[in-house]
Image (tube, grey):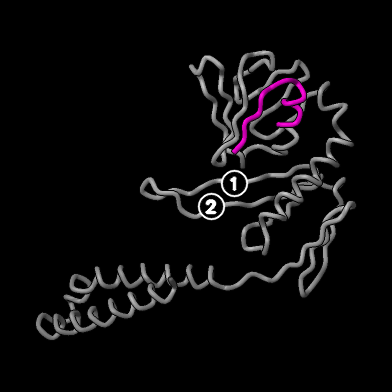
Amino acid sequence: MALLFLIGASIIAYFGLHTIEADIQKFGPAIFWNSGKYFILAFVFFIIFFIIQLIRSIPPMKKVIEIDDTGILIKTKKRSKSLNWNEISKIWLKLSQNRCLGLSTKREQYIKLENYTGKTIKFDTKIQDFEDLLQTIRKRFYQSYIENNFPKQNDSNNNFGAIEKTAANELQIGKKRIAVSEEYYIKVSNGNLYLVFHNNKKIIKIPIQKIANLDVLLGILKHQGIDIHSN
């Protein structure tokens, strides 16, 4: 892709220089901007996108990620970093399907781990076997988090980013309060979480990347009798 932008910039520069040169010889130097402004702007446009694509094409530093019962070990050529499961306070996910002109394109996925000081580590599809890594981290974190926090999750306010579960067993979404006893079910699909009310008259949609600890939230709601649908 970077090469295409470079070729485009070269073609524009070639024809632009010939056009501007001919106009200057005919009308004088004052015609320079009027004659060449579109070529110049197009050239700058192609060069900017060439640089962006060139930067994107640089391969990221190779990471080796090891996972065990204690946590995650991340190794690069320069250093190693470990993160225990009990040091992770939140997991953020993005599992969306990009679309262009109504057609599905590249699926955008990442998982971001946040510790109790607010520092984050992000893994995305550039990592080899990302799908397996994603599922393993989600499963291990859920097990660890539930073991340490589940008893108090049901009896206190719990913030899940865009959703808060109150001690009164209500879901707070913005200014809306929804009792867990209301007739609705949860659907997770195409990178979004939907609250679908059984009368089908109202649906609340929340992007998954705005929800912290999605699996924990779904586990708690399922434990309280809410139906969970996922695909």
Q: Give the amino acid type for the residue marked by disc 2 in the picture.
A: Arg
Is 30 displayed left or right of 114 in the figure? Answer: left
> Which residue occupies 64% across, 18% down?
177
Q: Where is residue 25 in the image (x, y as percent from the top left)?
A: 13, 86
Residue 25 in the magenta stretch? The answer is no
- Please tell me whether residue 52 is drawn above or below residue 115 in the rendered image: below
Q: Give the amino acid type for the residue marked by disc 1 in the picture.
A: Leu
Q: Position of residue 155 (x, y in %)?
A: 83, 21
Q: Mark 1 points at which residue?
A: 95
Alpha carbon distance from label 2 to label 1 = 7 Å
Badges 2 and 1: C-beta atoms under 8 Å apart?
yes
Helix, strand or loop status at disc 1: strand
Q: In which quarter of the image is the C terminus?
A: top right
Helix, strand or loop status at disc 2: strand
**Mark 2 or mark 1: which comes first in sequence?**
1
In magenta, the rendered stretch is 218-231
Please tell me the numbered disc located at residue 134: none
> Which residue occupies 48% across, 49% down?
98
Image quadrant assignment for residue 82: bottom right
Q: Name the residue under label 2.
A: 107
Residue sitting nearer the eye, 129 or 173 = 129
Q: Where is residue 180 in the image (x, y as percent from the top left)?
A: 69, 17
Residue 223 in the magenta stretch? The answer is yes
Image quadrant assignment for residue 208: top right
Image quadrant assignment for residue 130: bottom right
